[in-house]
Amino acid sequence: MDLRGRSTAGLVGPIRIPPPLPILRRRYRPARRSFRRSRQPRQPGGTRGGGGGGSSGVRGRGKGGCNLYEGRWVKDEEGRYPLYEPGSCPYVDDAFTCQENGREDRDYMKWRWKPNGCELPRFNATDFLERLRGKRLVLVGDSMNRNQFESMLCLLREAVPDKSKMYETRGYKISKGRSYFNFLIEDYNCTVEFLLSHFLARQGTNVNGQGSRNAILEIDRVDKSASRWKKANILVFNTGHWWNHGKTARGKNYYKEGGMIYPQFDALEAFKRAMKTWGKWIDENMKDRENLVFYRGYSTAHFRGGGWDSGGSCNGETEPAFSGAIIEDYPTKMKIVEEVINEMKSPVILLNVTKLTNFRKDGHPSIYGKGKTRGQKVRSKQDCSHWCLPGVPDAWNELIYATLVYEQYGVG
């Protein structure tokens, strides 16, 4: 342990640099809200997220107390899915438009999530929009959250009679090149927004004694976009995938804490400290406000024979996995997330999609990502991390809607 009581696991001789300048904060007066909810107590042995890691918390439970995140995928027999037709939504990034990119099978769009012991409320986009009236729904995270953001836009768009009254306020087309999108739905005076933040922690650069610059990650400071987090009524956070590769995984001269850059530091320990920093920010800035805060769990990748950058593949998968070790897989990062949420003072709803995505090896773009058309040569790198739209992220947003219903959010 160091003098501040921090673990020194993975640490070798810190380099000392001047401490960062203080963050200037401005006061923000939240809008009046139409409902109140009491803070839910943490259950013994559980998490307020109530997710798939064997926890038994109040959050994440549906009618009759069933766990929304323990269940199975069942084939849609009513013709309800997909909830919007492929090619009908202009907000889907080219990388996720699998049908337009040449994928011919359609069954991957016709599965619905069925929790054990209960049914999800039928998704109602009009009711969802009524609950969002006058509010801001903000998704913060990496490209997986952009995947979910695009799904959310498409789902809500189905209930907007005049499509011209739903638009990005600055006219931007969705692409991975921009870090912020703000869609206004005029008839409901609400916005659905996306803020790119790969780590939820603050990225920066350091200049060494020779004048060379190198990227760093400040694990004791939240992302610079946090000034916009404060203004949201509903927040959906995620991080995880960017911690697995490159300089982040190597941890060499990369992680900064206080006035120190660690020459070598363990990535998993860095993730834990960054999540605690995020949790502290939520506690300090959201505890007296009537917000809903979600943390969306790790979304499972399905690479065969390698990783995303080493020849891994998933093409040819046409149905979910129904057995095998992957069904019960639960990453250490998710256990860390549950631990952090349990220690927080403010209620956070763990949108624990990890186990439900374990099944869905059929739902990725694979070779049908951006730029792929019929007859083209198979790309050297397949996308087995993101999801086709329509597809699996629609179920994540159905779970958000179910939570709004069970929480009676936006009613009265």
Image (cartoon, helix red, strand yellow):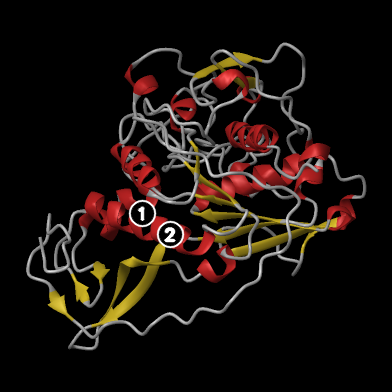
251 lies above or below 376 = below
Q: Residue furthest left?
A: 13
Q: Which residue is mark 2?
A: 200
151 lies above or below 316 = below
Q: Quadrant of the N terminus?
A: bottom left
Q: Amino acid at mark 1?
A: Met
x and y, in percent, of residue 139 in the image: 58, 53
Residue name at image x 50 percent, y 26 percent: 69
Q: Quadrant of the C terminus?
A: top right
* Residue 370 visible in the shown view: no
Asked if disc 2 and disc 1 are in contact, CB closer than 8 Å, the reply is yes
Tell me the element at label 2: loop
N-terminal-most mark, 2 or 1: 2
Residue name at image x 44 percent, y 32 percent: 354
On the rendered structure, is 92 left or right of 114?
right
331 lies above or below 220 = above
330 lies above or below 349 = above
Q: Residue furthest right?
A: 162
Q: Quadrant of residue 10?
A: bottom left
Q: Which residue is mark 1?
A: 275
Mark 2 vs mark 1: in front: 1
x and y, in percent, of residue 68 in the image: 55, 25
x and y, in percent, of residue 279 in the image: 41, 55
| Separation of marks 2 and 1 at Cα, in angstroms | 8 Å
Residue name at image x 37 percent, y 25 percent: 54
**Of residues 345 and 86, which is closer to you in this image?**
345
On the rendered structure, is 107 left or right of 43?
right
